[in-house]
Amino acid sequence: MSRSVVVFAGGDAPSVAAREAIPAGATVVAADGGIDHALALGLRVDVAVGDFDSVTPEGLAAVERAGARIDRHPAAKDATDLELALAAAAALAPERVLVVGGAGGRLDHLLGELLLLGAPAYGGFELDALLGGAHVHVVRGRRLLRGTPGEIVSLFALHAPARGVVTSGLAYPLRGETLEPGSTRGVSNVFDAAEASIAVADGVVLAVRG
């Protein structure tokens, strides 16, 4: 399996431009209706996960014929299809996981997706998401992000305070500060260069561009 894994979420379809963000040779894991989204972008699905209540019968049949591994779960379950798909991705021991989905659809699902990204279970690999036109990066330790000078990036602490946050390459630098969950302290920062560094001594930060 590839060390890069792409997880397609269900819900609204991702933009066609998402195809350009898929790493070459990446393993594709699709969560339920995400099967149709992956197929629409011309991708082969390696693992299909979910209760399959939203994928089209044609889409599910297509990936079964192509030899995808099918992880079927009951409709009554304690995790969303995306969480189950991320667990399947983590089991592949990847270096990087990219979640691809739409930015519309149900607000509760979108909120759940964003909170899910900061779970400790995914701390062993680099994790990003492309949700509609927004790029989301999970920062544990230190990350270098490429952007465009003048581009907005917002920083949010997930689940607990993010302590010792240090940034460079941003118009409003943070110098060892603490970001609290539920605070807007990190909203609407701006790239001051083509590359920005975000470091966190303790905790998890979600960096949102777009």
Image (tube, grey):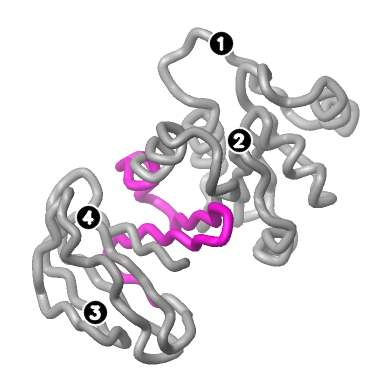
Badge nearest the viewer, 2 or 1: 2
Q: Secondary structure at mark 3?
A: strand
**Amino acid found under the numbered disc labelled 4:** Ala
Q: What residue sits right under mark 2 in the picture?
A: 11
Residues under numbered marks 4 and 1 in contact, where contact means CB atoms less than 8 Å apart = no
Write down the residue under mark 4.
157
Mark-to-mark CA distance, 3 and 4: 14 Å
Mark 1–mark 3 CB contact (< 8 Å) = no
Q: Is residue 110 above or below residue 83?
A: below
Looking at the image, is mark 3 or mark 4 earlier in the sequence? 4
Residue drawn at the location 29% of the way across and 76% of the way down: 189
Q: Percent position (x, y) of residue 161? A: 13, 53
x and y percent of residue 99 in the render?
Answer: 55, 49
Q: How far separated are the C-alphas under marks 2 and 1?
A: 16 Å
Residue 100, compared with residue 171, is above or below; it is above
Q: Please name the amino acid that badge 1 sits on.
A: Ala
Residue 75: mark = 1
Residue that label 3 marks:
167
